[in-house]
Amino acid sequence: MNTRMCITCRGVIMPGQWASDPAVRATSTHPGCPTPEQEMDRLAAAGDWVEAERIQCLWDWALKPVPNQLARAAAWYASLGLAVLRLQPGGKTPYPGETIAQATTDPAQITAWWQDTPQANIAIATGRLVDVVNLDGPLGLANWGHLTHQPAPIGWAYTPSGHHLYLPAQQGRGCTHHQAPGLDYRGPGGWAVAPPSWSNTPRGPYLWRQPPNLGGPR
């Protein structure tokens, strides 16, 4: 989790370079790479507002670290009524012996999990209050836009490789892989890796573009 990522090229910033170069620390980019402002201007000029917003979110995340952010986020999701489970650090899979059926909103259990494993990623169980559409890369986002009669998202997260759209849970709908190229649907029995979880790859963390709107704490 201590690996630093260049916001614009997504390559690893070496610890020595981060420590010795104030410009690298200020922009979270390699020398010679476009700065976040330059990259956002380029994307905006090309009409790619979604990717420009992602760069802004990544820059905000890099400059404003929050202590105990994983534990705080898990507790917040539970306060909204979203059942959570811890995942192995940097990954998408539960700890050995744990399953998504154990996802909970119980504050005591959530506190115990993240006190024991403070770097654990967060899973939000789908099929309860929310379902999630996983859009993998530009193709997934484009194919979602081509579908009709889809409910409006109540939350939108950036993932290391695309997007998660949070929808109200739909009765009778399960998990469907490859509903269209680059598009998977996660309902009962599934889960979504939730912000601010992180990836063992240098592609960046999970970040909210639009936090879930469930009508307030439950």
Image (cartoon, rainbow, N blue to C red):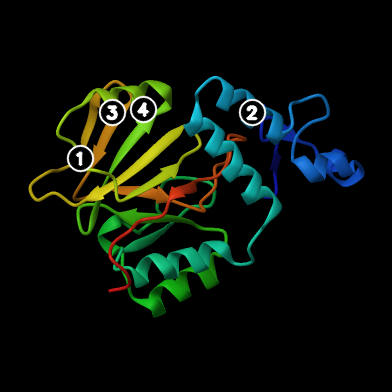
Find disc 3 in the rendering and name its residue: 144
Q: Which residue is mark 4?
A: 141
Residue at the spot 76% in from the left edge and 25% down from the top edge: 33
Q: Is residue 105 above or below residue 191?
A: below
Pointer 4 or 1: first along the chain: 4
Can you see residue 17?
Answer: yes
Where is 68 relative to 51, above or below?
A: below
Dot 4 or dot 2: first in sequence order is 2
Q: Which residue is mark 1?
A: 175
Marks 1 and 2, how far apart at CA: 38 Å
Q: Tell me the kind of residue under disc 4.
A: Leu
Q: Quadrant of residue 25?
A: top right
Q: Position of residue 44 (x, y in %)?
A: 56, 27
x then y, percent, for residue 59: 65, 44
Quick one: SS at disc 3? helix
- Number of other residues with Cα within 10 Å of mark 3, as a class: few under 14, some 14 to 19, many 20 or more: many
